Amino acid sequence: MLVNFRDIQAQNSKESGLKKNILFRGGQLTDLTAEDKKILTNKFQIGKIYDFRGQEEVTTQPDVELKGIKYENIDILASETSGNNGSLQDMIINATDISEAMMKTYESIVISKSALEGYRAFLLDLLEQKQAVYFHCFAGKDRTGFAAALLLRLAGASDEEIMKDYLKTNIARKEVNQEIINSLKEKLTEDQIEGLQIALTVDKNYLFHAREIMNENFGSFEGYLSEGLSLEKDYIEHFQSIYLNYKL
């Protein structure tokens, strides 16, 4: 089913914001209903799906194939060797020390080799798309949440707007998170359950930490784009010319 599914929006003083119904974020596309498929293919006419999950996640929980929609797997944390890969299994393993594990995950999302290569490929490919796109990971909250924050920042959104979109995940995933917890109660300890409840949500401090790591390593967002992702200096202008509604 579609979980944590939404288009991202930004409003600022210069532009009227991101075009509606063109950049969608969410969780993995497993067990889709017929109505879910119609939403993606007919209602929003998604042209491409970007899957940020690792190979094991993709193999065990593959996205439903949708006719007419291109699919690309970009494993954001492929080079991460410490076990912080953003999967449900990883959350369970690190449940007893989840706060530290999540901070390390966000560090990897910002500076790991695979993340830098992955987000670069994603952002470059967006310049070539002619239809709406959907990007996701397992829960649509960390690897996806950071990607959404990048796109909103590129659109000129304020820190407040970026955080607002990021934290919507906790509301959007509330019901399905509880279902996951209920299904695992008999298999995990109380401490693991408590940690998993935290792991399945987002916290503003995670995104703050990602920003700190970005500034420490690249000096600024612009430095991250040019030095970290090796994007051309005019990337922001090019992105905005495609994805923003300009006030005439």
Image (spheres, rainbow, N blue to C red):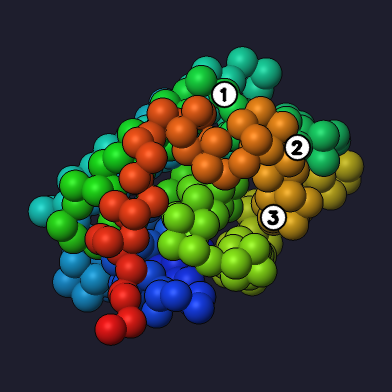
Q: Earlier in the sequence, mark 2 or mark 3?
A: 2
Residue 170 image offset from top left, x and y in percent: 66, 65
Nearest the viewer among 187 and 37 is: 37
Nearest the viewer among 68 and 103 is: 103
The residues tagged by marks 2 and 1 sit, at their Cα atoms, a distance apart of 13 Å
Give the crowd class for mark 3: few <14, some 14-19, many >=20 residues within 10 Å.
some
Q: Give left or right: position of 238 versus 69.
A: right
At 50% across and 28% down in the image, what residue appears?
227
Q: Is residue 169 visible?
A: no
Pointers 2 and 3 in contact (C-beta within 8 Å)? no
Q: Give left or right: position of 94 versus 168.
A: right
Q: Earlier in the sequence, mark 1 or mark 3?
A: 1
- In the picture, the quarter occupied by the N terminus is bottom left
* Callout 3 amino acid: Val
Q: Give left or right: position of 239 versus 206.
A: left
- In the picture, the quarter occupied by the C terminus is bottom left
Task: Specify the farthest residue to the left.
Answer: 68
For the residue labelled by badge 3, is the local secondary structure a helix, a strand or a loop? loop
Residue located beneath label 2 in the image: 103
Give the crowd class for mark 2: few <14, some 14-19, many >=20 residues within 10 Å.
some
Nearest the viewer among 212 and 166 is: 212
At 11% across and 53% down in the image, what residue appears?
68
For the residue labelled by badge 2, is the local secondary structure a helix, a strand or a loop? helix
For the residue labelled by badge 1, is the local secondary structure a helix, a strand or a loop? loop
Disc number at residue 202?
A: 3
> Within the image, what quadrant is residue 40 found in?
bottom left
Residue located beneath label 1 in the image: 112
Residue 237 image offset from top left, x and y in percent: 34, 54
With respect to residue 67, does 157 lie above or below?
Answer: below
